[in-house]
Image: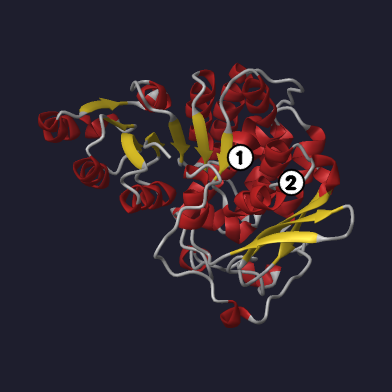
C-alpha cells in the first residue's frame, strides 16, 4: 500500500485529532499534506510543526498572521478564510484523499470540491449527506470519487455489507447509546445543564455532536446519512438503543440472519478502516475483550421522549430542503444551549418553529441549499431571545 497524501479538513476537532493519531501510527502509509482548522490557532500550529504539511489553512482569518509568521519559515504555505478551507483538499498537487472531519454544514462545500476533483473521501461529517444527500450522490455518480464513512455506525454497516448483494438487505439497524438522558423523563430533562448534556456515558466527542446525541437528533441524522450512503429507503432503516456501544450497527438480511460489527467505543477504529480503504491495519491498541461485555442490551427508542428522532423519517419523506432547515436550526439552537442562552428542550422548539417558517423547495440546487442554510440560521437566531412558551 503506497503512502497516501491526506488533506485533513477539520484537523483541530475531535475526529481530526484522532485522524492525525492514525497518521502518526502509520507514517509509512499516510502523510498529512494539508491541515485545515477553524479557530484553534494553538493546536493548528502544534499540528503543523509536528506533521510538516505543505499547506495549513485556518477559517478564522484573525489567526492568519500568527500562523504565517510561525510556519512560513518551515516551508509551509498558510492561507485563511472559508473559501481557502473549501478548496484546501484540491489546492495541493498530490493529495489523493480528503478527510472531511468538520462539524455541521461547513463540510458540504469541501466535500463537493473533493468530488469535483475525483478525490477519495473519508467522510466523518454526516451533515454533508443530511443537508444535500441527493445533490452529493448525484455528483458522485459523475465522478471517480468514492466515499468511505468514518461514522462508527456507517462503518459498521459498510463492513457488514462486504460480500453481500444489495437486494439481500432487509433492514439496516443503527445502534444508539441513548445518550446521557436515556433513563430520564421529559420532566427531568427540563432542568438539565450543559454539563449534564456533555456527560456522554460511552463516547468522547466534540461538544456539538455530544449534544446531538443527548437529543438523539444525531441518530436521526445517521438514518438520513445511511439512506444516501447505502441507497436503502427510510422504511428499511431503524434505530435501536444499545447502551453498551459495543455493537456499532447491524444489517438484517432477507434470510433472517443479522451481521454486526463489534468493537470498543473508539473512533480510531473506523478512521483506521476508512483510511485503509477497507484494508485492516494492524495496531497495538487495546481491542475488545468479549468476556468484559457478556451482557449486551437492546431497546426500542422512545420517540415520545426523543421526538427529534422522528425528523429522520419526516425529512426523507418530505425531501427537498427540509433536512437542510433541520440542520441549520439545530446548529443555532445547540450553540445557544452550550452558551446557556436556552434550556435543553428549547432545541426542539427552535427546530419546529424553523420548519414551520422556512419555505419548502422540492428540488433544491446548491445555491438553494446555501440560501436555505443562511435564512434558517437567521430565523433560528431570532428565536433565541423569545419566550419558550
Residue located at (22% from left, 38% from top): 52
Q: Which residue is mark 1?
A: 327
Residue located at (63% from left, 33% from top): 131
Taking the image as drawn, is residue 340 in sight?
A: no
Q: Earlier in the sequence, mark 1 or mark 2?
A: 2
Q: Residue furthest front?
A: 1
Task: Give me the C-alpha separation between circle 1 and circle 2.
Answer: 10 Å
Taking the image as drawn, is residue 153 in sight?
A: yes
Secondary element type, mark 2 = helix
Label 2 Cα crowd, 10 Å radius (few <14 / some 14-19 / many 20+): many
- Left or right, 388 with respect to 16, comes to right
Residue nearest the observer in this picture, 307 or 144: 144
- Left or right, 52 with respect to 275, comes to left
Residue nearest the observer in this picture, 154 or 42: 154
Q: Is residue 375 above or below residue 192?
A: above
Residue located at (64% from left, 51% from top): 159
Q: Is residue 302 above or below residue 228?
A: below
Label 1 Cα crowd, 10 Å radius (few <14 / some 14-19 / many 20+): many
Which quadrant of the figure has residue 260? bottom right
User: How many numbered discs?
Assistant: 2
| Residue 211 horizontal/vertical position (percent) | 54, 56
Residue nearest the observer in this picture, 205 or 377: 205
Q: Which residue is mark 2?
A: 311
| Residue 338 horizontal/vertical position (percent) | 46, 54
Q: Is residue 195 above or below residue 51?
A: below
- Left or right, 372 with respect to 39, comes to right
| Residue 97 horizontal/vertical position (percent) | 45, 32
Which quadrant of the figure has residue 49? top left
Amino acid at each position: 500500500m503506497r503512502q497516501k497524501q491526506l488533506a485533513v479538513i477539520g484537523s483541530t476537532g475531535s475526529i481530526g485529532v484522532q485522524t492525525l493519531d492514525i497518521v502518526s501510527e502509520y507514517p509509512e502509509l499516510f502523510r498529512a499534506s494539508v491541515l485545515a482548522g477553524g479557530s484553534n490557532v494553538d493546536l493548528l500550529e502544534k499540528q503543523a510543526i509536528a506533521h510538516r504539511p505543505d499547506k495549513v489553512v485556518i477559517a478564522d482569518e484573525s489567526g492568519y498572521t500568527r500562523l504565517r509568521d510561525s510556519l512560513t519559515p518551515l516551508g509551509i504555505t498558510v492561507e485563511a478564510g472559508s473559501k481557502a478551507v473549501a478548496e484546501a483538499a484540491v489546492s495541493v498537487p498530490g493529495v489523493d484523499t480528503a478527510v472531511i472531519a468538520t462539524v455541521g454544514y461547513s463540510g458540504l462545500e469541501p466535500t463537493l470540491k473533493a468530488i469535483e476533483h475525483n478525490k477519495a473521501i473519508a467522510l466523518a461529517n454526516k451533515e454533508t449527506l443530511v443537508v444535500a444527500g441527493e445533490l452529493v450522490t448525484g455528483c458522485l455518480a459523475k465522478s471517480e470519487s468514492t466515499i468511505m464513512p468514518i461514522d462508527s455506525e456507517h462503518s459498521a454497516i459498510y463492513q457488514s455489507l462486504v460480500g453481500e448483494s444489495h437486494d439481500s438487505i432487509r433492514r439496516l439497524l443503527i445502534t444508539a447509546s441513548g445518550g446521557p438522558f436515556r433513563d430520564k423523563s421529559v420532566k427531568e430533562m427540563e432542568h438539565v445543564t450543559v454539563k449534564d448534556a456533555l456527560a456522554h456515558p460511552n463516547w468522547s466527542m466534540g461538544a456539538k455532536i455530544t449534544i446531538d446525541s443527548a437529543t438523539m437528533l444525531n441518530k436521526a441524522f445517521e438514518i438520513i446519512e445511511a439512506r444516501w450512503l447505502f441507497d436503502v429507503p427510510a422504511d428499511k432503516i431503524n434505530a435501536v438503543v444499545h447502551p453498551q456501544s459495543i455493537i456499532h450497527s447491524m444489517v438484517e438480511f432477507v434470510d433472517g440472519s443479522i451481521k454486526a460489527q463489534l468493537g470498543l467505543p473508539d473512533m480510531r477504529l473506523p478512521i483506521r478502516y476508512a483510511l485503509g480503504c477497507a484494508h485492516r491495519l494492524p495496531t497495538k491498541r487495546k481491542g475488545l475483550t468479549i468476556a468484559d461485555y457478556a451482557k449486551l442490551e437492546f431497546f426500542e427508542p422512545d420517540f415520545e421522549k426523543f421526538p427529534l428522532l422522528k425528523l429522520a423519517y419526516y425529512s426523507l419523506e418530505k425531501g427537498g430542503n427540509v433536512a437542510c432547515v433541520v440542520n441549520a436550526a439545530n446548529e443555532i439552537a445547540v450553540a445557544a444551549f452550550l452558551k446557556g442562552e436556552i434550556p435543553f428542550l428549547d432545541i426542539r422548539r427552535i427546530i419546529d418553529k424553523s420548519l414551520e417558517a422556512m419555505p419548502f423547495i422540492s428540488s433544491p440546487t446548491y445555491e438553494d441549499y446555501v440560501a436555505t442554510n443562511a435564512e434558517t440560521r437567521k430565523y433560528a437566531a431570532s428565536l433565541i431571545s423569545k419566550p419558550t412558551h
